[in-house]
Image: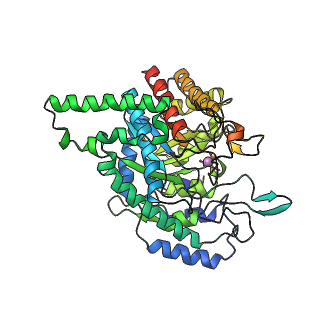
Amino acid sequence: MLTAERDTPHDASPAAWKALPAAQQPDWPDPGALDRVTKELATLPPLVVASESRDLLAALGRVADGEAFLLQAGDCAESFDSFSAESVKRRLQVILQMAVVLTYSSGVPTVKIGRIAGQFAKPRSSGTETVDGVTLPSFRGHIVNGDAFTEEARVPDPGRLLQAYHQSSSTLNLLRSLTRGGFSDLAEVHAWNQDFVTATPQGQQYKALADEIGRALRFMTACGVDTGSLPTLHQTDFFTSHEALLLPYEEALTRRDPMSGDLYATSAHMIWIGERTRQLDGAHVAYFASVANPIGCKVGPTATPEEVLALCEALNPDRVPGRLTLISRMGAAKIEEGLKPLLAAVRDAGHPVVWACDPMHGNTFTSDSGHKTRRVDDILDEIAGFFRAHAAEGTWAGGVHVELTSDDVTECLGGSHEILDSDLDTRYETVCDPRLNGRQSLDLAFRVAEALRARS
Ligand code: PEP
Ligand code: CO
């Protein structure tokens, strides 16, 4: 057993990972430059503070206990190029809209976490990419290199770590303002519907739900409830998360919380380990074991019950509810039978995890037109299989983890506004994986809400 796995956050070192093999790290051409950047990052303010991560831990604890639902959503990879206040606002808007559908339709509180304000680094299935006989290093996210297919763009540049930090900081700043009042006020629920969605059946269904919420608020006021004085109606809790892939960046932003004495990743409220970096004896598991944040771990179709139990022991030895979210990403065809033995093993061992369903990453393929895409039907099927597996094992289907944008992009096939392979070229804008557009995201929220209602 590795010492790093056994350390509690109280006596751990944020550098414990250094002695272990770290998968999916870029080949930095100038280690001295990386060192200078991480030293600078270590002097910069934390992006989030420990008490906020503890609030999220408590909220996720309620999900683990079967009293709330998790919606974790956002970009596959945030971009340095398409960053704007408007894009942050729209991404928040679609998540608020989905959350209100989920909460209103199911009566279960929704914990909202964005894949935002730090979701930059990407693991790749191959270290190189070949186009027309030319082979270059793969694009690893804007925190590492550029997406253009040129030799120059693909060189890992540590200066990008600082740019990612500053973009995350401005994104968080805006998110904090938008969620503290005004925009996220429940009275604004109609305004979250976007123009291109309004006329569609989902838009109309959403409008009807928003009308009901408006009526309920007016009813409360008429009954003498001073709705103006209830902060929960005017503000919302919104948390940030990303895959903590680049360990030098994460280590530089790891700080000891003076209140608890524990180490916290301050790059986001929650961080997760990807499917390609969850090796039990690897650097990522050791780093995650050293911090006290709520954390996630992806679980793909090859994961065995023994492996998953070992991950639970390494990452949550104290069995704190809400500390560990296991995010299954098996593919629509494998989810039901693949997930059941894992649910049974974790349940029987008494580990209080949150189970979330990522219906995106097991359903990616290259279409005839050469686009990396996903079918909305496969995404919905995987979610349905996830709910069936939980019903069979008597466990709580705790949440969904999805890649989306509020924009009217054409990246995923199908949906009620049928997007065909020949349409993909129209607005294919992602810098990494294909995302659901605003309409497909709302559609998904209504479908998940139905599944939530059906189980209660
Ligand atoms: C992701 O979430 O973007 C991702 C790369 O997922 P996974 O690690 O499950 O492949
Ligand atoms: Co992705």
Comparing 5 with 131, the one in front is 131
Q: Is residue 421 left or right of residue 278?
A: right
Is there any visible trace of residue 150 in the rendered image?
A: yes
Q: Is residue 411 left or right of residue 161?
A: right
Identify which residue is drawn at 44% across, 30% down.
Answer: 204
Identify which residue is drawn at 67% across, 30% down.
Answer: 334
Q: Quadrant of the C terminus?
A: top left
Q: Position of residue 37 (x, y in %)?
A: 55, 75
Is there any visible trace of residue 67 in the rendered image?
A: no
Placement of 293 over or under 360, stated as above or below? below
Comparing 446 with 456, the one in front is 446
Where residue 266 sits, quadrant-wise, is bottom left
Q: Is residue 90 left or right of residue 383?
A: left
In the picture as drawn, the residue positioned furthest to the right comes out as 133
Q: Position of residue 442 (x, y in %)?
A: 49, 35
Q: Position of residue 119 (x, y in %)?
A: 54, 55
Identify which residue is drawn at 51% across, 76% down.
Answer: 39
Placement of 73 over or under 26, stated as above or below? above
Identify which residue is drawn at 26% across, 29% down.
Answer: 216
